Image (cartoon, helix red, strand yellow):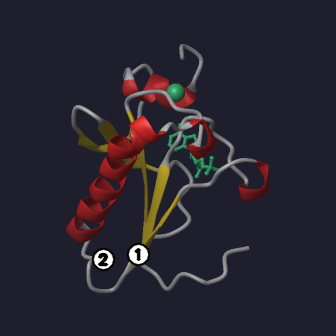
Amino acid sequence: MSQCLFCKIVRKEIPAKILWEDDLALAFEDIDPKAPTHVLVIPRKHLASLEEADWEDRQCLGHLVMVARELARQRGHGESGYRTVFNTGPDAGQSVFHIHLHLLGGRQLAWPPG
Ligand code: AMP
Ligand code: ZN
């Protein structure tokens, strides 16, 4: 997807503070952090949202979750806790249509979210 913002980050056409890269995924700092740790974990493959995913994508989606756990542990949140969120569609406020898993941590997170 040539015009997709996060595909451009995957292709290194726009800068990002990249924290993780492997054959399936990339993780980078959110540009507008909502917590001391706010990282986005994305697949290299363009997938607009969870609604667009097929069952064949489940390994890739599970991979994103495990990368988020690894980064949460690296940041010292393994014991204190953290949140992993996919925003999907208008009611969830999804604004970038390349699927991304938010990793939030480093402070007490309110529940339920707004
Ligand atoms: P969502 O609202 O769930 O679609 O989340 C999109 C996230 O992408 C927001 O938290 C934004 O702050 C973040 N974001 C937008 N543009 C960039 C960028 N160029 N680099 C890093 N994060 C970004
Ligand atoms: Zn994309």
> For residue 13, what is the image quadrant?
top left
Between the C-alphas of marks 1 and 2, the distance is 6 Å
- The C terminus appears in which quarter of the rendering? bottom right
In what element is the residue under mark 1? strand
Which residue: 67% across, 75% down? 113
Q: Amino acid at mark 1?
A: Tyr
Position of residue 18 relative to residue 87, above or below, is above
Q: Rate crowding at label 1 as few (under 14), some (14 to 19) or many (20 or more) other CA atoms within 10 Å.
A: many
Image coordinates of residue 50 in percent, x first then y, are 57, 45
Q: Nearer the viewer, residue 24 or 75?
A: 24
Residue 72: image quadrant is bottom left
19 and 95: which is toward the camera: 95
Query: Would residue 27 be seen by someone viewing this image from the given angle?
Result: no
Left or right, 111 with reference to 7: right
- Disc 1 or 2, which lies upstream in sequence? 2
- From the top left corner, tell me how far across and down residue 82 is, in percent: 41, 75
Residue 68 is situated, as x and y percent measured from the top left of the image, at 33, 58
Estimate how packed mark 2 is, as few (under 14), some (14 to 19) or many (20 or more) residues with alpha carbons within 10 Å. Answer: some
Residue found farthest to the right: 91
Residue at image coords 50%, 46%:
100
Location of residue 16 with respect to 83 vertically, above or below: above
Q: Position of residue 10 (x, y in %)?
A: 39, 27
- Residue depicted at x 29% and y 35%: 24
Classify mark 2 as within 8 Å of ligand 1 or not, answering yes or no: no
For numbered disc 2, what is the local secondary structure?
Answer: loop
Residues tagged 1 and 2 counted as in contact (Cβ below 8 A):
yes
Q: Which residue is mark 2?
A: 77
> In the image, is 97 to the left or to the right of 71?
right
Q: Amino acid at mark 2?
A: His
Q: Residue at x 62, y 35 (%)?
A: 97
Reading the image, the residue beneath label 1 is 82
